[in-house]
Amino acid sequence: MSTSALVGETYRRRLIVFYIPLFLFVFAMLFPFFWMLITSIKTDAELYNRRISPFLVRDPTLEHWRMLFQDTLFLQWTWNTLWVATVSTGISLFAGVLGGYALARLTFRGSTVFSVWIFITYLVPPALLFIPLTGVMSFFGLVDSRVSLMFAYPTFLVPFCIWLLIGYFQTIPKELEECARIDGATRVQAMVKIVLPLAVPGILSAGIFAFTLSWNEFLYALVFLSSPENKTVPVGVTGELILGDVFFWGPLMAGALFGSVPVAIVYSFFVEHYVSGMTGAVKG
Amino acid sequence: MKKTTRKPVESAAPKKGLTRRDFTKSTAAVAAGTSLGIFGGVAPAFAQKREVHHLAWNNFIAPADDLTRENAAAFEKESGIAVRFETINQNDLQARAAAAIEGGAGPDILQLHWNHAHLYAGGLMDHSAIFELDGGDAVYSYQQEAVIVDGVPRGVPYYGIGNIMAYRTDVYSDLGIEVPDTWDQYLTAGTKAKAEGWPFGQTLGHTLGDAPMFCYPLMWSFGGSEIDESGKVAINSAATHRAIDFMKGAWEAIYEPGGLSWDDGSNNRSFLSGEICTTANGASIYFVARQKNMAHIADNMSHYLFPKGDAGRFCMSVPLSFCIPNYSKNQEAAMEWIRYQLRADNYEQYIAVQNCYGLPRAPGLEDHPVWNSDPAVSIYAQVPQYGRNFGWPGPFGRAASEVQSKYIIVDMFARAVQGESAQEAAAWAEKELKNVYGA
């Protein structure tokens, strides 16, 4: 077989097993964003005209963007969401790192059962917890305060972070830590100076997941917050832009598009760590 | 790593000047101090202003909510009671109400739809004082049934939202179709329209409004009902079979087939896109067409009542009520605010500003000029007289609500149009209803 034939076969093979699936995957991932963008810049007349191609924009307008930014408190909601997601992620990561390390490394009675219970806690749906949590928030005077979400979100984020980090810490060889202990490091020093640097990708992965879960959370934000200026993006956008059975699709899609930008930025900063976090701490 | 003498952290000596006890005291003091500020500490009682937190849905007619806010400002001047009027998406009202009542904290007035006052009756105060003061006996019976639980009013009726047929006048005119008065005429009209590329649209999905508000009146007008007056399950009757058979035939002949999966907004979108020419809905399609300057739709549409069957003509109207929870510490102030809104002049203004979208709670306002201001929607004034509630002719209680929440009647029709016979679908519904009613 000639060289050119071999090259051609390799190219076809790569096309079938790599490029076409990659293209389909990228298309599926990006299509919702494309749809949100074009819907947000179409006029209402175009939005409701099914006789023209829905994939093209004939007469672009920024009216829906204007409505989103000027007629609603979208920027305030974004700030609230960012603030709540950042704080609750920070709290959850702190607790998650300590809990995950303890359950992965320390041997104490009931540690295995405790791990399983944490996992079970994570499985309890927020739809079952929001009513008792309302009473708790009311007792502490936190209703209609963003602080309520900063305390509520860790109820599902901490178990999630602990569970994820237990697995991650277990991939780090104990010997590395034991060497440090032999050299005189305390357990805390060994953890801080040896284990945590190796666990950064895992911690970032847990952080990104926690941040995204907080960003998108709807039910607690709906129930605990009532003042428009305190609301988060998911609750504010759906609350203000769906009136009865009427959906304001243009501003809704603009809200969905701009609401996903901060999460995309967080991902873009940490994507390399995130990927390595998915594949384990130490590669042999 | 530098070799050091190992010291367990647990036994490390505290730093000079800050003992563990000092640290505990300091943090406790800081926590106590900041909690007053951060956690919304309560000001002394003498400095507190009377305030009522009123939770309601986002009224589709935005000027109605604007008017409520204006009234709230006027009310505050008059009474010294501030009103925090919060509006949210209608689908989220129940989650907020459930959390507030079960958690014992939240708004002082909850706007509840349908008969949700029955669901939360244990957490709602007795509204007898205000119910009678504001003409409670005069309001439409379907409104009263929504809030009276075991003889005690657990709320005060506010207004209703009707659901009838929206249709394209130009299409009907071009095709020579008369506005149907009976279900047979409706079927004939739809068959002709669909043959010309103008199907009717109807959802049989699990939607809050459009699916049940069509299916129940259809069943009633053929003489069917889920229970009889004594509360005994009566669904599996010849009348119900006729209603189901009608729907089975109509589904193929006149409707857009995608309706099985439609939500409450889908028929609005299809109508405004010019894909269908008739659908059961509130007046929102018309008002959206007006607001969005879609004159080709708004200038060519109108509404008609649901057609009548052997047993008569029926409609449904969503009752909306004010409900004050037991936990509210501002019950007196909340009642004053409700009284203010129901005061004849304020109430008339509120109904008028909704341009026939909101239906008055009691007879008497049908002659208001607003009902003649726009012929496209003036027919809505007649809806309350045909209004019935879920469970009719039996009680409109928790069980009727559960049946609606489980979409048993809607699913009965949906199962039939997907292949089951009328007898099979009704038998399935009977079994499900007996699980709910226990008889």
Image (spheres, grey):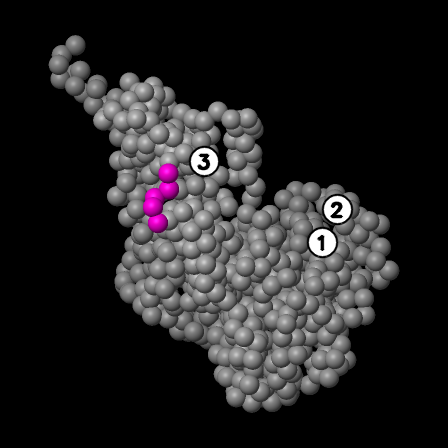
In the rendering, which numbered label is found on residue B403? Answer: 1
Label 3 chain ID: A
Give the farthest residue toward the front: B16
**Residue closer to the observer: B346 or B237:** B346
**Residue closer to the observer: B45 or A246:** B45
Percent of width and height locating residue A108: 51, 26
Q: What's the distance in space between the residues labelled 1 and 3, CA to CA?
A: 46 Å
Q: Which residues are magenta?
A: B13-17
Can residue B224 be seen from the camera position used here? no
**Residue drawn at 41 percent across, 34 percent down:** B11
Mark nearer the viewer, 1 or 3: 3
Can residue A207 be seen from the camera position used here? yes
Examine the residues drawn in magenta and state their main secondary structure.
loop
| Callout 2 amino acid | Glu
| Callout 1 amino acid | Val
| Callout 3 amino acid | Gly
Horizontal side of B226 relative to A122 (left or right) equals right
Q: What's the distance in space between the residues labelled 2 and 1, CA to CA?
A: 8 Å
Element under label 3? helix
Q: Quadrant of residue A80?
A: bottom left
Percent of width and height locating residue A176: 31, 22
**Residue drawn at 40 percent across, 25 percent down:** A170
Q: What's the distance in space between the residues labelled 3 and 2, CA to CA?
A: 48 Å
Percent of width and height locating residue A111: 52, 28
Tag 3 near tag 2, CB within 8 Å = no
Q: Which residue corresponds to mark 3?
A: A99
